[in-house]
């Protein structure tokens, strides 16, 4: 039976319910996922947002077996400079994005949440989010990247048939086929040329002579994606994310102080 994951999203609640649940000790989750970022011909621009909210809901549901969890509205604009040549794609400057993350996360903490998980679906957003959160209380906040952990990379390596990829590719398209198959148009999936770099710079749809040319905007081969691969990837991803979230929630402030002292040069 499907659980009611909607019960964790604060945008669907009155403020007094949010306040009560915060007072009762609810953990906060802040998803980061673009809603205006090209994902090839076969996926919608809000692919990252769909993934961020799908994952946040299920992490919240899993956490809620031991402690309540509340999901804040997704940060849908971020630093995504590799895609700005494609219609509809938006990218904030690093400074603006860092300020946005820091202020929103800081307000969640100042509003009473004792712990906050920042769930990040991006790659170019990783360093800016780290810098933004470094200025907040590290004992109360944890940056989670959806592709990090021991299980997901291992499963992805085992399943991958494509020779390269990291965007709207075999892996991401498989995830979407498992999460939201009605939004995937596999008849329009198109592989990108093999580029010189493992992680390309700014992709371009208009210059075939560029080393970063991709007519569709994908980087990899989405034609090899399947829902079965997506289910396996999602299971590994959720296990990784829940393990990291649970460990962080269980930590007390002494653990963070000890880690901070250990990192100081002596």
Image (spheres, grey):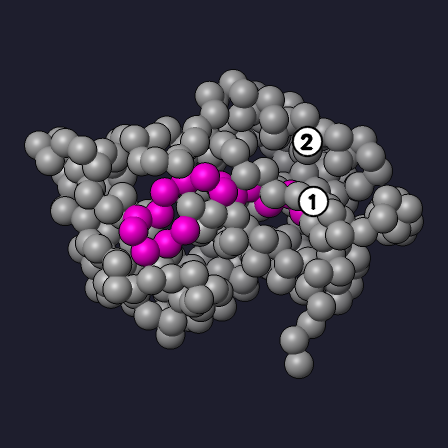
Residue 79: x and y in percent read 45, 29
Circle 1/circle 2 CB separation < 8 Å: yes
Using the image, tell me which numbered label, if any, was put on residue 210.
none
Horizontal arrangement in the rendering, residue 108 relative to residue 199 (left or right) = right
Residue 159: x and y in percent read 30, 67
Helix, strand or loop at mark 2: helix
Location of the C terminus (image quadrant)? top right
Task: Mark yes or no: residue 172 visible.
Answer: yes
Relative to 113, residue 186 above or below: below
Q: Assess whether residue 130 is covered by the magenta stretch.
A: no
Residue holding disc 1: 72
Residue range (magenta): 29-44
- The image quadrant of residue 38 is top left
Viewer-nearest residue: 86 or 147: 86
Residue 48: x and y in percent read 47, 48
Q: Assess whether residue 35 is covered by the magenta stretch.
A: yes
Using the image, tell me which numbered label, if any, was put on residue 104.
2
Residue beneath the point at 64% across and 58% down: 57
Which residue is farthest top? Answer: 95
Q: CA distance from mark 1 to mark 2?
A: 10 Å
Which residue is farthest bottom? Answer: 1
Relative to 159, residue 133 above or below: above
Work out whether mark 1 precedes mark 2 in sequence or the reverse, and give the earlier one. 1
Helix, strand or loop at mark 1: loop
């Amino acid at each position: 039976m499907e659980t009611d994951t909607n019960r964790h999203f604060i945008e669907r609640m009155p403020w007094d319910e949010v306040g009560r649940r915060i007072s009762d000790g609810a953990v906060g989750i802040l998803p980061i996922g673009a809603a205006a970022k090209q994902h090839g011909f076969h996926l919608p621009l809000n692919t990252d947002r769909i993934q961020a909210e799908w994952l946040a809901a299920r992490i919240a549901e899993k956490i809620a077996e031991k402690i309540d969890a509340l999901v804040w509205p997704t940060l849908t604009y971020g630093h995504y400079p590799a895609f700005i040549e494609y219609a509809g794609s938006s990218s904030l400057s690093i400074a603006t994005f860092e300020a946005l993350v820091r202020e929103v996360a800081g307000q969640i903490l100042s509003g009473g949440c004792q712990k906050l998980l920042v769930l990040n679906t991006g790659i170019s957003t990783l360093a800016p989010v780290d810098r933004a959160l470094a200025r907040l209380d590290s004992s109360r906040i944890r940056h989670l990247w959806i592709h990090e952990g021991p299980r997901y990379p291992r499963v992805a390596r085992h399943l991958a048939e494509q020779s390269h990829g990291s965007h709207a590719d075999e892996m991401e398209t498989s995830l979407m086929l498992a999460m939201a198959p009605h939004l995937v148009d596999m008849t329009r999936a198109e592989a990108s040329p093999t580029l010189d770099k493992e992680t390309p710079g700014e992709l371009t749809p208009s210059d075939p002579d560029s080393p970063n040319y991709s007519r569709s905007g994908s980087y990899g081969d989405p034609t090899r994606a399947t829902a079965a691969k997506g289910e396996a990837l999602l299971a590994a991803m959720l296990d990784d994310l829940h393990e990291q979230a649970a460990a962080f929630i269980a930590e007390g402030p002494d653990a963070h102080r000890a880690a901070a002292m250990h990192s100081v040069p002596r």
